[in-house]
Each structure stands twice: as C-alpha cells, then as structure tokens.
Amino acid sequence: MFKFIHLLFLVLFSYTSISANNKSNSDPDITIELLNITTNGLILPNNTISFNGVEDLVVEFDLRTSYTGTVANYCEGTSYAAFYEPNNFDNETAQYYDNGVRPIQLIWDPIKLEHINSNNYSYTYRKKLLFKKSTVYNTGCSIVFRYGPAKLTYKIIAGTKTGKEPYTPSSANVKLTSLSYSDGSPVANNKIIVPDYIGNEIGTQSINLSFDFDIKYGSQLSKGYYPQYLIQIRHDEGYSTSLIPLFEKAISTDKGTVTIKNLQIKSSDIRPNDHLRILFNFHETQVNLDWALIKGNNEKPILNNIISDNQTIGYGQICKSFTTSSAPYIDYSITCDRNVRACQTVYDYRYITSFQWQTRTQETNWTNISGATAKEYSPNKNFYENTYYRRLAHFSDEQYSISNTSAIIIQDTSIRNNICCDQSLPLKNSQPQIINGDEVDSNIYTYQWQSAKYSRGTTLQAWHDISGATSQNYQHIFPEDAITNEEKTAFRRVVKLNSLPVSVSNSITISRYTTGVIPPTRREGTTALLTSQTLMSLAEPDDNNTLIHPNPFINSFSIEGPINLGDVKLYDSFGQVLNINKTQSSKDKIEINTTNLRSGAYILKIDNTSFSKTLFKN
C-alpha cells in the first residue's frame, strides 16, 4: 500500500514539475503564499529559515493558494509540499526531479478554492511542520509547495547532517489505549459487531479508537519525514481494506495520542475472522497491530427496547420511574420443510432478561449505573441538572441493543420554549396552519418537533420525532383524511443542546372532524359559548372577550382571549416593563408567573391595542 502511494506520488509530482518547467503564457494565474509564519528558529530573507541553535524546528503558517481565471478545473486540486535533500551533498537548490533529488512527502491535502469575487478564488488553511536538526544537511534542504503548475520554494539551513555519520535506526512505540462504539458502548470480548442490514440498507457500525505513539528519528528518511498510519480491516486471505480515505495520515509531533471518531465499518467489507489493524510506519520502522475481531451480526435484531419518555421536572425534584410496556425480545424465525416444499412461520419470541442501565449529564459520558440491571429503573434522587438515561438489553455476550434516550429535564426558565396553538379543522381533509414557537439561540440550540396520536380521542400514545422537522416553526401535512368523527394529534417541540434535549415545550392538539361541525368551546368562569370562528373574528381584546383571573392574585394569573403571547406586557407603577414568565397553555389561554415580583399594583397592557388592566398582587 505504501509503495503504491509513493509511486503514485512520484508520478504526479513528476508531471507537475514538467508542467512547471514548461509554463507558458496560457498557464493560469496561480499563486502560493506562506502567511503569518511563526517559528522557534530564525526567519531570513529569500524564503530561508534557520534552526538558529534549536534541535527541533517548529514552523507554523497559513498556506494560501489563489487563482484568477475562469477554468473550473483549477479551483479544485491537491495542495502538497515535499522535503528535498541536496544532490551529492552540495548546496544545490532542489526544485525538480531531473537533478536526481528524491522528494519526501510533508503535506498532501485535497482542497477546493473558494470564490472571493469576480474571477478570483482562494483557500487558506493553517499548517505546522516539524524538522529535526540531525536530519537536515549542513548545506541546506528545500521545501517545495505546489498546487497545479505553481510552486513556492523555501530553504531550511543550519542542520548538522553531513552524510558521514554512522547509520542510526529509527524507533516507534505504539500502544493501543481505547476502543468503543461511537455511542459510547464498550466493545465486548474484543469483538466489533457489525449488523448485516439496517432496514433495507447494508449495515454499518461506527467506532471510536485511540492509540499513543512515541518515536525517535534515525538517519533514513526513505518512507517519509513524518510518521504515518493507516486503519485497516485485515482479511485472512492476505489483503487489507483501508478504513481511512485518501492517503496516509501524517503526524508532525514526536509523541502524542491519535484519536479517531465515528470510523465507519460496512458489513459488506467484512470476511470471516477479519481483524481491525493499525499500520504505523516511521522511516524504516513498521508497527503492525491487530486489535479486535470484526464480526457480522447474523442474529435478528433485538426489538422493543423502548423506555418511557422524557420528563420535565422542577429544580431539586424527584422524577418518576422509567418503565416499559413489555420486555425487549428477538423476533420470530422461519423454518422450511424440504420434504413438503413449504415454509412455516414459527414464532420464537426470545425475551431479553439481562439489562444494564446507563446515565450521563450534559458534561459527562455514558457510564453504567451500579446494580441497575433490571428491566425497569427508578433513580430515586433529587435532580439539579439535566440528566439522561438509557438501557442496554443484552442477548448474549456480544449482541445487545441500546434503547432510546430519556431525559430528566430541569425546566430552564431562560429557554423560552412555548408553541401555539390548538387548532380545530372543520373538514376531514383540512390541513393545519403553521405551529409557531419561541425562537432560541440557533448558535447553541437545535429544534426537533414531535407528534403523538390520541387513542379513542382520550389516551395519548408515545411521542415520535417528525423526520426533517427541525426548524423554529412547523407546518404539518396530514397524508390522509381523518377517518373517525374526531381525530386528534398532539404536537410539541424539543430544544436540544449537543443533540441531547434540554427543554420540552407545551403540547398543542390539532383536531379534525369528518362531520364538518366543530363543537363549541366553553370558557371556565364565563357563561358565553364561543366557537373557533367567533374567536377568530374578535380582532381586539376587551372586557367582553378577555378574561383575567384571579385579580388580586398571589404568584400567577391567567389571560383568556384572542391575544398573542408576545404582545402581553406588565408594567410597574413607574411605567417600567417587568420581566415575567409567560406560557401559552392553549390557543386562547396564557399563564403568567410573577413569583419574582413584590406585592403591589401592576398594569397589564396588550401591544397594538388600547387594552389596559390594573392588577393587584397580594
């Protein structure tokens, strides 16, 4: 693999060098620049950098490639750099292959130039290079940066290599430190289980891994200046499949830790008895480590591993137990009788009895809960931060299923997560209006809308994420007409931080009627019967269509009427707008919490209307 890549690199580099030598007036206008250079050595004129007495020269810079023109092919390519040792130990500047100088790869990055303006394109990224004084000739070495036919040459001087030193070998120590599934679950028995299929798609498994390395430079640079690694699937047939795309990954430090996340393994790449391998190359040293056996999962999946839904509680409160309607199980199997040429479905529900509950917070990773190995679990503690739970259902030492994640959410009053409002649709094929919700900081939080059906019009079923519904507001489209006389669907919005829920909104209900008649709604505390059409016709709130109760109040009061949540304002006796907690509990009802206010008189006003009401807090 490494020989092939090196040969390909030589061919590409040779072609590019010939193009640079024969550059004509028709060649594109491409420039390469090193900007914002920082180094522990000495920067000299004419693109020269000196060790200036340091043993390890570290050079950091912004590598900018620019192009002016209209040829699209020049806007996407490979940005690379090579280290050249002088030919015959003289001071010749190494620029092309035709002088016998062998290049050693330093940078190899596919890039795409970004459109700046007119016909101008550019791409800039930060790079760091490390050079050892003992590996650079005292007559100097060259670093050549290239993109297409363009090149930029820098020189490194003040090394100590003369070509007369005795051979010294390089060394590399590599230690494997961790391997887990990307969701945080451990790999059992050193075997990575990859499902054969997920639905109708070829199964994949995502893993995380880390390894430590420690290297010492020798006098041979034949396999590159820096250490490189590949992550592979090693097959018993004697060949390997790389899991890292493109070329080898280079490391520009002497020692450290390499961490790889979300590495995908496809079941179609797996053969019997395959292994996960780390191939680490450094100069003439090669470390070959086989870590774990990769095994496809031919078992049917574990089903029904579902725990109860999220809970929203107050600060310091205790949550309810996590329950499940039935235990997870392995589905039925099918057997065939060859004698009668017929197949029979044999229901073989193998119920799961081995469990492990896990928990995490916003700042921690998933950890096992000691002793929590039953089908259900009760935390039985006071909660002061958002906490998340899930359940692992084990069928064997290797096969297990991870449940949905349930969150214990401490309702954060700083997150305004209210949605509005209930809707009644007069016809079986009517479609609802947009459901509006409060806006949160999109740089921090994300949205996920959920829905749940009502069974027989009264019992709310399980909540499910709505695919693609991740915007501030949501407009639902029913794919089919209502069937029963009254068909109800509930909706709510979950606000997430780093993909985990931190706030659950109030829920609203959309009802559809096959008869075309919407039942009237009676307001508690009033004698009037108002239909939804009547409420929509009431353009401005007044004492006839708006009810505020109780008044006087203690810590909270309600507003019932055709009022938008954002228009409600509460003022003190000095005319200052006060900070209050407003919740839209239904289409025409707003709850106001004033626990932070002192006793006294306050004025309630509705923006863009003449409505004003004096309220008293006891």
Image: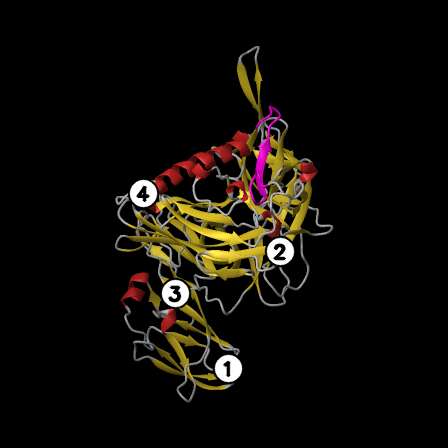
The image position of residue 188, as x and y in percent, is 68, 39
Q: Which residues are magenta?
A: 221-239
On whether residue 78 falls in the magenta region, the answer is no
Q: Secondary structure at mark 2?
A: loop
Does the residue at mark 1 contact the one at mark 4 (Cβ under 8 Å)? no
Kind of residue indicated by mark 2: Glu
- Tally the numbered discs: 4
Q: Secondary structure at mark 4?
A: loop
Name the mark nearer the viewer: 1 or 4.
Answer: 4
| Nearest the eye: 36 or 616 | 36
Does the residue at mark 3 contact the one at mark 2 (Cβ under 8 Å)? no
Q: Which residue is mark 2?
A: 55
Q: Which residue is mark 1?
A: 597
Q: CA distance from mark 1 to mark 3?
A: 32 Å
- Circle 1 Cα neighbour tier, 10 Å, few/some/many (<14 / 14–19 / ≥20): some
Kind of residue indicated by mark 1: Leu
| Nearest the eye: 470 or 174 | 174
Q: Which residue is mark 4?
A: 23
Q: Considering only order in the chain, which callout, 3 or 1, is on the residue closer to the N terminus?
A: 3
On whether residue 229 falls in the magenta region, the answer is yes
